[in-house]
């Protein structure tokens, strides 16, 4: 009996040594609240590798204390008090800081200055478009944008206005990713 237990233990240890230990990846909520302590109304660039990602033309500001009437920055805040937005109303992108693939599950968003902002969102891997979605945003209504896009290495956001407007800024908060 002792020999059988020894053989089973030996075989089990060989099998376990050959099998890689793979832990499931965890969802991360990026809420932008630990980047700065500022009341700047212009925004501050999100640093490289924040949340394991690389941020191009993505700024953050204090949306709760934003004191310009009728701006959507306070509407965009989910977890007080900071919110991300596309700097200068220009296109922005987020990519993996390590070059690995990731998943974008969801985020909250609203328009910052003008109603009827249309945001085209494109998920890519190695330059190839895998996913595309367009959302319409208003200033005083925050929406939940659900994507569940896996296997991407970058995501692009481009905002436009149906009617002429000079500001196509939009907010992002509580970005749900899996790295």
Image (tube, grey):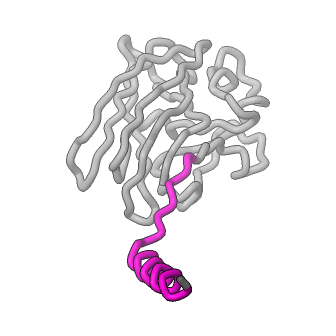
Identified at 33% across, 27% down, the residue is: 133
Q: Is residue 26 left or right of residue 132?
A: right
When the figure is inspected, residue 103 is found, relative to residue 89, above or below; the finding is: below
Measured as percent of width and height from the top left, residue 59 is found at 57, 44
Residue 8 located within the stretch drawn in magenta:
yes
Residue occupying the point 40% across, 77% down: 15
Question: Would you say the magenta stretch is mainly helix, strand or loop?
Answer: helix
What residue is rendered at 65% in x and 41% in y?
31
For the residue pair 114 and 121, the one nearer the viewer reads as 121
Name the side, left or right, on which 159 lies relative to 88. Answer: left
Q: Position of residue 64 (x, y in %)?
A: 76, 29
Of residues 163 and 56, the one drawn nearer to the viewer in this rendering: 56
Q: Which residue of the protein is positioned furthest toward the front in this rendering?
A: 1
Q: In front: 2, or 142?
A: 2
Q: Which residues are magenta?
A: 2-27
* 142 w.r.t. 100: above or below: above
């Amino acid at each position: 009996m002792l020999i059988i237990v020894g053989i089973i233990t030996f075989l089990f240890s060989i099998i376990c040594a050959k099998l890689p230990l793979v832990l499931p990846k965890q969802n991360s909520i990026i809420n932008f609240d630990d980047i700065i302590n500022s009341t700047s109304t212009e925004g501050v660039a999100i640093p490289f590798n924040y949340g394991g990602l690389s941020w191009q033309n993505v700024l953050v500001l204090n949306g709760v204390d934003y004191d310009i009437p009728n701006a959507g920055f306070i509407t965009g805040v989910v977890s007080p008090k900071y919110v991300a937005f596309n700097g200068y109303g220009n296109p922005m992108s987020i990519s993996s800081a390590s070059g690995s693939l990731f998943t974008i599950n969801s985020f909250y968003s609203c328009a910052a200055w003008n109603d009827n902002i249309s945001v085209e969102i494109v998920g890519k891997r190695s330059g190839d478009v895998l996913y595309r979605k367009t959302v319409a945003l208003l200033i005083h209504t925050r929406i939940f944008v659900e994507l569940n896009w896996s296997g991407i290495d970058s995501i692009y956001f481009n905002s436009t206005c149906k009617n002429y407007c000079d500001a196509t800024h939009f907010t992002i908060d509580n970005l749900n990713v899996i790295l």
